[in-house]
Amino acid sequence: MTERAREATLTLMVIALLAGAVALDLGSGKAGEGSVPEIVAPFVGRALFCSALLDHEGASGRVTVSSGLERAAVAVVPAPAKPPGAGTRVWSGPMRTRPQAVEGRGAPLFAGLSLDLSSSKERGSAAARCSPEASSDWFFAAGTTAIGHDERLLLHNPFPEEAVVRITLFTQISDIVKSSLSDVAVPAGGSQEVRLNRVVVPRQLLGAEVSAVRGRVVAWKSVISRPREGSRGFSFSLGATEPASSWFFAHGLIGRGVEESISVLNPSERELTVTVSLAAKDRAAQPAGLMDVSVPPRSARRLTLDGGTIAGSAKKPVGVSATVASTNGVEFIAERELSYGGDLGEGVTAELGAATPARSWLVTPPAAESERDSIAILNPTARDGRVDVLLRSEKAFRAPEPLQGLKIGAGLRLEVPLSRWTSSGPPVVALVSSNVAVVAERSARSRRAPDWADVLGFPLPDA
């Protein structure tokens, strides 16, 4: 047996043992129904799956875990050097060279990643969600193998049998099927990193679909940007498991010093038409050039947001949210990219949108050591709303008065600064609640590796 096989076997044994522990009743200590082998599958199905570290010089990162309003016992596999204590509200630990699984006992958990690169050639910061599911399909609308960019897909198989996936790539003209990507093995309990620059000629835009031939996986995308001209930085994002008819982006900036684009992937055999609507704090806009935009079958298209569409953006960056909707019933994937510069400092980010709004959201910290930390909230409904933001750390649960009862207009957005409470000390998770359905996304600039990072929140079930 190889060293990797022994390691995978050991990991699965730990998962099985932990699954047995999860079945114990906390009050009586009695075993729950079924034997340990019968509990393994439900444990894996309920777990949150977190990516392994990027295989790159200078890569580091942290996992931040929290429940919603309830308390939950936290279990992490492989076990960290400092495991979560009893009654932990928020737990944070280093990312590992192997994927990690997080399981809650007593209440559901939510987990996010904050990553840094600090090598001699590349520096950057990024954030992504851990996944509450493994899936047969994953989609990414934005990506690039242009000169100066390094794009990778990180695949994780949490199950005890090898998975095999097929990766299809999409350009602005058509899809690409490469023989080297048609039969990619992902080991049991392990991960596989696919470097697209090694198999694809330079492409300015490259969407991707990961389809399981056997088994199920979790997929993330990373892009390290170091072009000769343009912004440098690092982005990392969890993929989407299925297309949708609308996508909502709470965070966004247009104007001097920034460039924002939304890439649309049409994986279907039908032509797609989409319309992009923008929302600022006090006004909405419908750019004529972003109405009924055509995206051919099996292709991707990048739409640039013009800085002149929102008043004041010609002089300085203005925060905007975006809604991308299908106008002909064809479902699709949408992903936003931001390039920062000027007074905001250099950096790049990428994040998929939310397919549906919700009344409550939990948002993990985008950066381990942050500045200019804030949450953007989009209200896509036809009703004015009110928003409360609660802050949870390992030792405290706060409801700062300036963050309560905030007004958000119908069809508009709200930007909530958090740096006053989050710029120092342990990681802080934000809980957003509203009387109308909204979308919440958090962005921050890292002090450790000067770059911007943003992450979409987790929608919480209605109480």
Image (cartoon, rainbow, N blue to C red):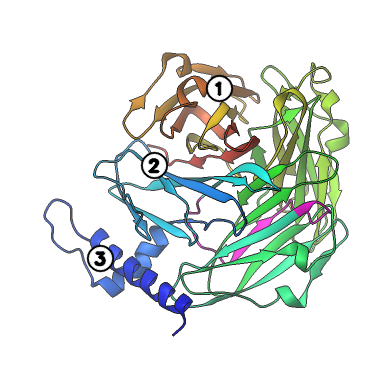
- Tell me residue 259's x, y (percent): 79, 34
The C terminus, quarter of image: top left
Residue 285 lies in what quarter of the image? top right
* Name of the residue lying farthest toward the top: 402
- Where does the magenta region start and end? 130-149
158 vs 237, left or right, is left
Q: Amino acid at mark 3?
A: Gly
Callout 1 crowding tier (Cα within 10 Å): few <14, some 14–19, many ≥20 = some
29 vs 462, left or right, is left
Indicate which disc, 2 or 3, sits on the residue closer to the N terminus. Answer: 3
Q: Which residue is mark 1?
A: 416
* Name of the residue lying farthest toward the front: 120
366 vs 285, left or right, is left
Q: Amino acid at mark 2?
A: Ser
Q: Which residue is mark 2?
A: 66
Q: Tell me the distance, in whole angstroms, between the alpha carbons under discs 3 and 1.
A: 42 Å
Specify the label residue 20 is tagged with: 3
Residue 78 lies in what quarter of the image? bottom left
* Name of the residue lying farthest toward the bottom: 1
